[in-house]
Image (cartoon, rainbow, N blue to C red):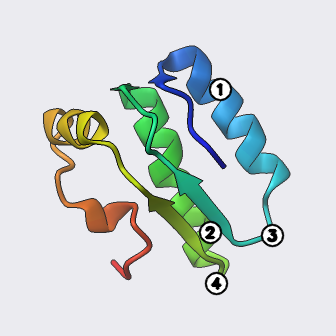
Amino acid sequence: VMLPARLDSAAAISLADRLRELQGTDVVIDASRVELLGAKAMQTLLLAAASWRAAGLGFTVTNVSAMARTHLSDLGLSDMRLIEGAAP
């Protein structure tokens, strides 16, 4: 799943819908184009990652852009293991 450049509240809803379609399968998220990562989108990714892992499925976010890393840090989530697929 290629994330859009702008992950605001509206994009978070679309992302949640797309992830629902992918339930039951391993998921790889490409965050290379992300320029804006809002709190709602981050929450959507974190909840999905937890749900996938609880189901024993893979959920990995790759190619995290520098701007996305900055937004993660701003949200107090600079520990990328939260979304990169590492065990908690």
Residue carrying label 4: 56
Q: CA distance from mark 4 to mark 1?
A: 24 Å
**In the depicted view, which residue is nearer to us: 12 or 62?**
62
Q: CA distance from mark 2 to mark 4?
A: 6 Å
Q: Earlier in the sequence, mark 3 or mark 4?
A: 3
Query: What's the amino acid at mark 1?
Result: Ile
Q: Earlier in the sequence, mark 2 or mark 3?
A: 3
Q: CA distance from mark 1 to mark 3?
A: 19 Å
Residue carrying label 3: 24
Q: Residues within 10 Å of mark 4 (few under 14, many from 20)?
A: few
Element carrying mark 2: helix
Tell me which residue sits at (19%, 60%) in the image. Answer: 79
**In the depicted view, which residue is nearer to us: 69 or 54?**
69
> Image quarter for residue 13?
top right
Residue carrying label 2: 52
The numbered mark at residue 13 is: 1
Q: Earlier in the sequence, mark 1 or mark 3?
A: 1
Tell me which residue sits at (15%, 33%) in the image. Answer: 74
Q: CA distance from mark 3 to mark 4?
A: 9 Å
Q: Earlier in the sequence, mark 2 or mark 1?
A: 1
Tell me which residue sits at (56%, 75%) in the image. Answer: 53
Query: What's the amino acid at mark 3?
Result: Gly
Element carrying mark 1: helix
